[in-house]
Amino acid sequence: MSNPPKLLDQVREKLRVKHYAIRTEQTYVDWIRRYILFHDKRHPKEMGAADVEAFLTHLAVAGKVASSTQNQAKSALLFLYREVLEIELPWLDKVTQAKAPKRLPVVLTVSETQAVLSRIKGHHALIAGLLYGGGMRLMEAVRLRVKDVDFARREILVREGKGFKDRVTMLPEALVAPLKLHLAKVKALHDEDLAAGNGEVYLPYALDRKYPAAGREWAWQYVFPARDLSVDPRSDKKRRHHLDEKGVQRAMKQAVRDAGLTKPATPHTLRHSFATHLLQSGYDIRTVQELLGHSDVATTMIYTHVLNKGGRGVVSPIDKMDLLDRGLDVYTPEAYS
């Protein structure tokens, strides 16, 4: 009789059955491992809500983690108990919550955005263009498949975005020609892979078992493939994965520095700027909500607070005064010379 799989292997198997992303799998397993070590390697079956609360409180008080980090750990432990151990925990109401800062998103002006985009080159420039031109998230762009780009309709189908939701966003006209040229190069690379006996790409939802040949089809290939082949950690198959998003992050950071900006802009800032600039142009907030893939319009409403109209769009009373016309020159450049 074979031994039952170890607990962390059970967690991995359950996550894969439920089609969680591999990064989520790695994160959840890491949090569960830390939870077990925190309680001196006791088995989670021997523990309960009080032990989960103690661990989460420790993260907030001693670890001083961000609220999002604490919530991530909480989600991992709830998954462990509910989905793997099939134990329903009572409501965790004694957890010391990490403080959630109320921050507005960083947004670039149109001229700042142009300055940054003009300093990003190659395929990184195409990805940055999709983030700003279509409001895509970074991982949505690097995971984009050939079949989900519709040049005729000028649309991009974003599959399994945040919350496992699909949505349609625009394919900017400015990116059509360079994207077609890029895909021609990717197709040549894929043909070389096929000739060398490779050319297979990862397929979601075990489609490779249902359609064994689909992984080598052009339609399923990543629009932004990695430079080198790598071994899939789940299947041990040698494949060409998508581009590493860290390269885009580094390119964006360098472009922001070269443009002389002081704002802490990241690739996600381009998505924020996309939404804000559409609202500035007069587009309906519901349209922007749909393009971003927000479930609740309240999430999209945050961009109304960062529109380029001053605080909440209010005109300062000092701007209504004709100070210069009345001989009050305290705000003229000469007053500071």
Image: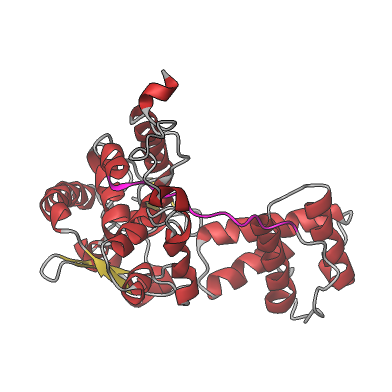
Tell me what residue is drawn at x 76 percent, y 53 percent. Answer: 34
Locate residue 35: give its quadrant: bottom right
Q: Nearer the viewer, residue 23 or 229?
A: 23
Compared to 86, does 237 lie above or below? above
Q: Quadrant of the C terminus?
A: top left
Residue 203 spot, x, y in % from top left = 37, 66
State left or right for residue 285 relative to residue 90. left
Query: Which contiguous range is marked in magenta?
Result: 98-110
Tell me what residue is drawn at x 48 percent, y 55 percent. Answer: 311
Compared to 49, does 182 lie above or below? above
Characterize the magenta stretch by its predominant secondary structure.
loop
Q: Quadrant of the N terminus?
A: bottom right
Locate residue 97: give its quadrant: bottom right
Tell me what residue is drawn at x 74 percent, y 68 percent. Answer: 3
Residue 119 spot, x, y in % from top left = 27, 34
State left or right for residue 295 relative to residue 145. right
Compared to 188, does 171 lie above or below? below
Residue 161 spot, x, y in % from top left = 41, 68
| Residue 157 covered by magenta stretch | no
| Residue 100 covered by magenta stretch | yes
Residue ranking furthest to the top: 337
Q: How many marks?
A: 0
Compared to 39, does 113 lie above or below? above
Residue 6 is at least partly visible in this image: no
Q: Nearer the viewer, residue 102 or 42?
A: 102
Q: Nearer the viewer, residue 191 or 247?
A: 247
Residue 180 is at least partly visible in this image: yes
Residue 293 spot, x, y in % from top left = 39, 71
Q: Nearer the viewer, residue 220 or 166?
A: 166
